[in-house]
Image (cartoon, coloured by chain):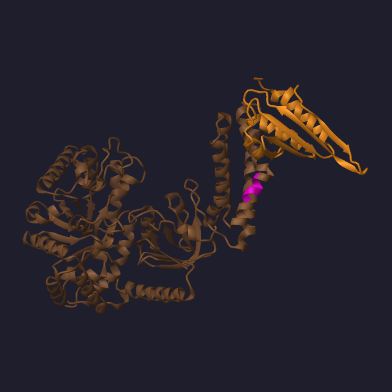
Chain colours: A brown, B orange
Amino acid sequence: MEIRKGIAVSPGIAIARSLVIDSRDYRIPRRSILPSQKATEIQRVQEAFDKATVQLSALEQAQVGREHQIKDIFAVHVRFLNDQSFRRRITDCVEHELVTAEYGVSTILREIASHFAGMDDEYISERAADIYDIERRLLTHLLGDVRQAVEHLKDEVVVVAHELTPTQTAGFNKTFVKGFATEAGGRTSHTAIIARSLGLPAVVALEDVTSCITSESTVIIDGNRGVVIVDPDEQTLEEYRNYAQELSRFEIELSSIRDKPAITRDGVEIELLGNIEFPNEAVMAREKGGMGIGLYRTEFLYLYSGAEPTEEDHYEAYAEVTRHFEGRPVVIRTMDLGADKLPFSVRHPGEDNPVLGLRSIRYCLQNLTMFKTQLRAILRASVLGDVRIMFPMIGNLQELRQAKMILRDVMEDLDEYAVPYNPDVKVGIMIETPSAALTASLLAFDCDFFSIGTNDLIQYTLAVDRGNEHVATLYSAADPAIFYLLRSVIHDAHKARIGLSICGEVAGDPEYIMLLLGMGVRTLSLAAPMIPEIKQIVRSVTMKECNNLARKVGTMDSQRQIKNFLRDATTKIIPEAF
Amino acid sequence: MIATGEHGRNDKDDGTLSVPEYEIEVQIRNVEGLHMRPAMQFVDTASRYDCAIEVSNEGTSVDAKSIMQMTMLAATCGTKLRIKAKGPDAGEAIAALRQLIEVKMFGETPA
């Protein structure tokens, strides 16, 4: 039994046989097989050779009457594939080292290729390229099996890969694919996004998990705790089966409160909104009982196609989301990426520290054409519903005023062409830098609402990179510094009578709900799957007890003390969350 | 044609019929050596015969019918190779291979 820890990016539990997907473009990892699988793997090698030979012979034939050089290349490759000692070297590797066909092919061919590459003579060393070509061809056939396997699944599987691309995931059938685990990736990786929209458990950043998985492995994906267990022992399996059952019982319970209002026991109404990345997630947000969208992250539009999105690309996405929530708030956040992440950014200054660099609103204010395109689309969509604009990473009043001036320019442009938009569109900002949090009282008078982005606010305030496993435990919303800062921002927002919401991960974390409510937060924006559970908590507490809890937390002096206190309090209210 | 020796053994002292065995030494004469196309021609020629054929280059010995092994031999222009054939058609095999390497020079330009 192997236990690996990664990043949990989509909640839930999956227990199933593993289906490992390799990418031809990435090094094939060493994967072991059981002695009983030897014959199958050797057979796969033979079949790959046969298929490749057929393919190459056809290619050779097609060159008859043309340049003989190309024909010769194919002819040589065919001879390689027919070379029995060559084939045997691979099958011997598979047989004696008990590894997969892919690994055998890749290893042996690379050995041979490097033998050639090391030769002085140019004609000989060039043969290395031929070998790599043959390797690619054989791997395509071997991996093609797997692609076929994905399209023709008959049992439940958990998909494991180094990374998953849009093309690969497009073929996944939810009836059979029960979860994902990848070695690469982060919270906003493609895998994470797809898993969340499909509602499947997923864990990423597992490093080298594929090397400990055989094709007959049973894998447990714990998308709640970010853990993957390979070949669990009986006891662990039993524990997880029970856990999974409890979770689905809980889910059924929760779905019944979908249409019930998010209101505390003593009558205080809380607004629960959804965080989305893709237009189609809006559907799930609605289904789970979301009363609108509190954070529409628009970065996907810039990353998806590799080219800069057009005004129409923007508009269509915004219109689609707004239509799902007619009359309810849809807060659209303007581009929040760094130049280093943009696939089409030409002049990208090599930055040592991109997180603190030219990104987000700063980048937009220096790339007005791109910025105005997005603003134009948002304004056009503002006639379709209660669309609101939110600027990310605002650090000071001057920046906010600049952004608003650009917005006014765009409004004037639209006026000139008599394009309709809502001139009273609400404009707000994300409070995610310490400077914004500390000067919130100044900013509050120049915008219609704040949304506190706790993810980045915590990182910048505690000076901790939460992606760095050496210090990740220091990152916590339970730190007294964060408590004081939030308290101050909430106070400033209330004083100026502007909207206030929390859109960071804490808004979807059961342990923090009572505290946030007790601190005066009345709007939470979170990932759709968690909306029912958070609503359950809201409906189970009184504002009085939340206020008491917040007061008590204000007297505590350490992360640990606060965390334990919050956990205890929440467990009493909603034991199933743990 | 450079041949430093031909050894053919057909009879043993005990009077039993033995398998024909031939060995010659040849030198690669074309400019590009035993690269892709020549290697292919060599292997194709060798594969026409039933006998076992071995090629040696300074201690390394490979199977003449394996293109992988023949290419790895890395025989360049001027390299001297020992070819050993054992089997009923060994004589024809040797003759054909010598033709290819030293007479036809794989149909390419000589050094």
Residue A87 counted in the magenta span: yes
Q: Residue at x 50, y 59 (%)?
A: A19
- Residue A489 screen position, x and y as percent: 11, 60
- Residue A319 screen position, x and y as percent: 28, 51
Q: Quadrant of residue A339?
A: top left
Query: Which residue is nearer to you in this view: A496 or B1?
Result: B1
Q: Quadrant of residue A344?
A: top left
For the C terminus of chain A, the image quarter is bottom left
Q: Using the image, determine if residue A72 lies above or below residue A137.
A: above
Q: Residue at x 52, y 65 (%)?
A: A217
Q: Is residue A288 visible?
A: no
Along the horizontal axis of the image, is B19 left or right of A74? right
Query: Which residue is nearer to you in this view: B26 or A444?
Result: B26
Q: How many marks?
A: 0
Query: Which residue is nearer to you in this view: A412 or A574?
Result: A574
- Residue A444 screen position, x and y as percent: 9, 55
Q: Using the image, determine if residue A571 lies above or below residue A373.
A: below
Report the magenta residues as a range: A86-90
Q: Residue at x 61, y 52 (%)?
A: A93
Q: Using the image, determine if residue A241 lies above or below residue B59.
A: below
Residue A182 counted in the magenta span: no
Q: Quadrant of residue B54?
A: top right
Q: Is residue A381 visible?
A: yes
- Residue A21 screen position, x and y as percent: 49, 54
Direction bottom: furthest residue: A572
Query: Which residue is nearer to you in this view: A54 or A8?
Result: A8
Along the horizontal axis of the image, is A134 left or right of A281? right
Q: Main secondary structure of the magenta part?
A: helix
Q: Residue at x 42, y 57 (%)?
A: A182
Direction front: furthest residue: B13
Along the horizontal axis of the image, is A99 left or right of A351? right
